[in-house]
Image (cartoon, rainbow, N blue to C red):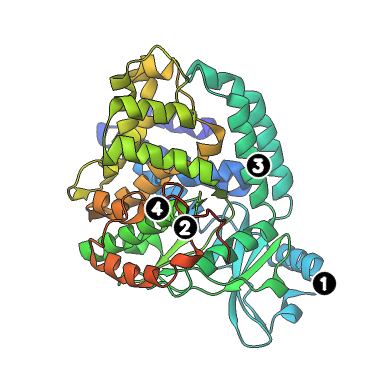
């Protein structure tokens, strides 16, 4: 890239102003394409960063954002012979013998593996995800480098447990490398949402799933880039479905699918969404859920700066006795709850999402006194993807809704009636499946807590 820039700079020196603009645009485009190609070929953790950069911040230059968007589903694929080698090693035969039909051209290629259409010998249409050879070694090396780099984190968050955060990140990303773990998580989510009117999760085909091969039912629908051109009503429903899935999974089933990005969804115009990737899932205990719901209660439902501080201390976000006023802690916490604070329709936009994400990432500029002492408990690290990933997705869709009222339907300590058309459909479904949800940590006395089961 440096060599390309040097050549174009030399040409630019003897060019007219109009030609200089053309050369500048050419440099930006070529740089974007080279960055996307490099990250795409690196795969693993570096490619995940490229995926996030493609949608979390409107400030990323348009050519770079457009190029990086290809990493969501259309990364450089591996050759058919490499795919066949992995299938043969994992399923003991070539893909054309394991499956009745096998499409050598992938329908998606992402950070850990690529996906092919196939048909089983009993006639089922399936999607087969095949892990890239060597990607496990690459990700482990990336994570080793991350461990070395964590020394810099305390310079921004003085009280943060950098080693704890790195350990949590390592555990979750290494889990993603074992498709058997992902298969178990996806099948559990599929059982939780069985019969749901607008949330679809493909069932796993266990006999064709191993550590590096994951086979599931095929899902159909439009990609995210197409949905961005749909009508406002259609985009609103798509955004509401994604929001409901994230909040219901967390607050009702105590599990969070921690990789919200545009390549993990397929859409139908009526609001139905298929959710495709369950490689990074964080489950929460009843005690942890109680801490989160205490924050909901004191930050949103019944705002109280004194009680909010106590809740933040219990959850580990603020050390006991830190020299910060209750009001400053409450102001800082508003960043995390901004989308659901007010009982009104909020139009999510790219600009809104970028502003919110930047306030979170650069909170040390706005709240230096708070950031001097606050912490991100490692167990809650991946919940930051709600503020970063989920908000960015809604911003890209330009989705409009009263997010507060929808959230109140899904928070057990509010349990409000449905507020939208999709909410009414979901309420009918939920009335028949309440028995599979964990009891609320803030539920009535005497209700025995239980782990959710398929």
Query: Residue shown at 38%/37% (left/top)?
Result: 295
Q: Quadrant of the C terminus?
A: bottom right
Above or below for 197 versus 6: below
- Are the residues tagged 3 and 2 within 8 Å (C-beta)? no
**Cα–Cα gap, marks 3 and 1:** 29 Å
The numbered dot on residue 92 is 1
x, y percentage for residue 129?
A: 63, 65
The residue at which mark 2 appears reads as 263
Secondary structure of the residue carrying tag 2 is helix
**Cα–Cα gap, marks 3 and 2:** 23 Å
* Residue positioned most to the front: 446
x, y percentage for residue 119?
A: 62, 82
Q: Is residue 64 visible?
A: no
- How packed mark 4 is, by other alpha carbons closer than 10 Å (few <14, some 14-19, many 20 or more), is many
- How packed mark 1 is, by other alpha carbons closer than 10 Å (few <14, some 14-19, many 20 or more), is few
Secondary structure of the residue carrying tag 1 is loop
Query: Residue shown at 27%/68% (left/top)?
Result: 424
x, y percentage for residue 34?
A: 52, 43
N-terminal label among 1 and 4:
1
Question: In front of the other: label 4 or label 2?
Answer: 4
């Amino acid at each position: 890239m440096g060599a390309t820039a040097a050549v174009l700079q030399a040409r630019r020196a003897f060019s007219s102003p109009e030609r200089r603009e053309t050369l500048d645009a050419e440099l930006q485009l070529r740089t974007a394409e080279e960055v996307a190609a490099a990250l795409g070929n690196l795969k693993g953790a570096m490619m995940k960063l490229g995926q996030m950069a493609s949608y979390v911040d409107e400030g990323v230059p348009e050519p770079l954002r457009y190029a990086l968007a290809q990493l969501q589903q259309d990364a450089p694929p591996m050759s058919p012979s490499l795919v066949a080698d992995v299938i043969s090693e994992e399923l003991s035969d070539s893909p054309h013998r394991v499956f009745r039909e096998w499409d050598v051209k992938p329908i998606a290629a992402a950070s850990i593996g690529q996906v092919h259409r196939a048909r089983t010998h009993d006639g089922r249409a399936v999607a087969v995800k095949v892990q890239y050879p060597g990607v496990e070694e690459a990700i482990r090396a990336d994570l080793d480098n991350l461990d070395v780099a964590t020394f810099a984190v305390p310079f921004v968050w003085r009280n943060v447990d950098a080693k704890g955060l790195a350990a949590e990140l390592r555990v979750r990303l290494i889990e993603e490398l074992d498709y058997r773990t992902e298969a178990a998580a996806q099948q559990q989510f599929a059982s939780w949402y069985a019969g749901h009117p607008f949330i679809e999760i493909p069932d796993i085909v266990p006999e064709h799933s191993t550590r590096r091969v994951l086979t599931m039912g095929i899902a159909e629908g439009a990609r995210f880039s197409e949905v961005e051109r749909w009508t406002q009503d259609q985009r609103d429903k798509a955004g509401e479905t994604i929001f409901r899935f994230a909040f219901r999974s967390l607050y009702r089933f105590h599990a969070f699918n921690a990789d919200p990005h545009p390549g993990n969804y397929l859409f139908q115009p009526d609001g139905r969404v298929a959710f495709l990737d369950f490689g990074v899932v964080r489950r929460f205990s009843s005690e942890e859920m109680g801490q989160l719901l205490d924050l909901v209660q004191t930050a949103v439902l019944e705002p109280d700066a004194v009680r909010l501080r106590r809740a933040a201390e219990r959850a580990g976000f603020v050390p006991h006795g830190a020299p910060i006023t209750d009001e400053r802690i409450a102001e800082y916490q508003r960043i995390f709850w901004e989308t659901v604070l007010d009982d009104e329709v909020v139009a999510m936009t790219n600009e809104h999402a970028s502003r919110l994400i930047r306030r979170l990432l650069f909170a040390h500029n706005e709240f230096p006194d708070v950031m001097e002492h606050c912490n991100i408990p490692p167990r809650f690290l991946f919940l930051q993807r709600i503020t970063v990933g989920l908000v960015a997705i809604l911003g890209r869709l330009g989705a409009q809704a009263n997010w507060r009222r929808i959230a109140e339907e899904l928070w057990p300590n509010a349990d409000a009636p449905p507020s939208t058309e999709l909410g009414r459909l979901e309420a009918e479904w939920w009335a028949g499946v309440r028995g599979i949800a964990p009891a609320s940590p803030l539920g009535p006395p005497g209700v025995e807590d239980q782990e959710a089961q398929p």
